[in-house]
Amino acid sequence: ICGRVWRVDIGGARSNWQVSLLGEFGSDATAADDRRFFHRPDFVQSKDGPNNSNKFDAVIIGSGDRPNPFDRDNTGGFSSIRTNWTFMIKDRRVLPASETNAVADTGFIMDSLLDVTNNCLQTGTTGTCDPDNKLQNGWKLMLSQGTGEKSLSTPITLANTVYFTTYLPFGEDTDVVGDVTAGVDFDTCGPSEGEGLLYAVSLADATAVINYNEYNDTTDADGNTTSETLDASDRTSNLSSHGIPADVVGVNIGGRAYILPPDLDPDKAGDATRWRTFWYSAEDGDNY
């Protein structure tokens, strides 16, 4: 409701159960702030550095209006444009609520979290990126790869990397590095599936961790890569499948973590002989 994220403590005796507000990142007062969460968050127990006193519960969630997936301006019928974001909220109230430990609201709002959209922590001067130390509360990443971009799936965190998909509605077209170009208009006769992006960012600060964009790497005279460059464009990769992308799935193979992106090519399961079957129900007056 109104971009709110709640924490519910239900362990132990019922007298200790408690509901507290983790963050409020939207409002129905203005269309631009009318952010909505339709998919569950990812939850990761983590800490800032080696000191165990800096433990926190990371809550990662993305906004997007699921009932209006084709809304390219994210207006929801309003006149001003709504921006969608992916949030990583640091809940440092790691102890459960009890008779001696009442869990108060955090009071987090949009301005409480560090805006990491420009990737300053990776490509800028680190000391000037977070003068107010907002990263101690978490980060927020604007979904700005295309008009109407929405988070319509649940994130997953593996090996300190957050993976999630977003949806670009029909009318947008993206190239291999995620830059939006002119797309097909709604009035054009054609499929209206839209397309999706796969994100991979650091849990700590949303910096790029995978070299998705090889076009910005340093190469020699023969075109061979001599060094990789990670910047904001390396956060995303275009999915080959169309439509609203599914969740990223994590699997363990030989003790190592792998992801299954939603655009996997299906393997043929084999041909089976199928016979046509008809259902015939006799009624009064039928002649045999």
Image (cartoon, grey):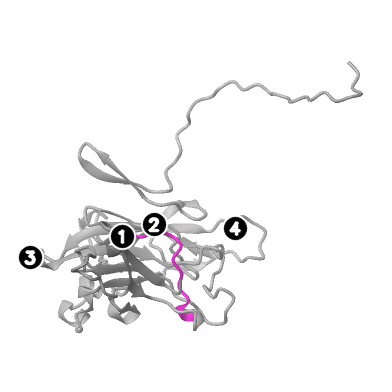
Q: Kindly state the secondary structure of the residue where label 2 is placed.
A: loop
Circle 2: residue type: Thr
Q: Which mark is residue 154?
A: 2
Q: Earlier in the sequence, mark 3 or mark 4?
A: 3
Residue 14, quarter of picture: bottom left
- Residue 160 position, x and y percent, is 22, 57
Q: Earlier in the sequence, mark 2 or mark 1?
A: 1
- Residue 145 position, x and y percent, is 42, 68
- Check disc 1 and report the residue beneath it: 14
Closer-to-camera residue (69/223): 69
- Residue 118 position, x and y percent, is 30, 75
> Is 260 on the left-hand or right-hand side of 220?
right
Disc 2 from disc 1: Cα separation:
30 Å
Q: Kindly state the secondary structure of the residue where label 1 is placed.
A: helix
Closer-to-camera residue (216/206): 206
Q: Residues within 10 Å of mark 3 (few under 14, many from 20)?
A: few
- The span picked out in magenta is 32-41
Q: Which numbered mark, 1 or 3, is in the foreground of this view? A: 1
Circle 3: residue type: Asn
Residue 212 visible in the current orientation = no
Disc 1 from disc 4: Cα separation:
49 Å
Q: Kindly state the secondary structure of the residue where label 4 is placed.
A: loop
Q: Residue at x 46, y 62 (%)?
A: 38
Q: Which mark is residue 192?
A: 4
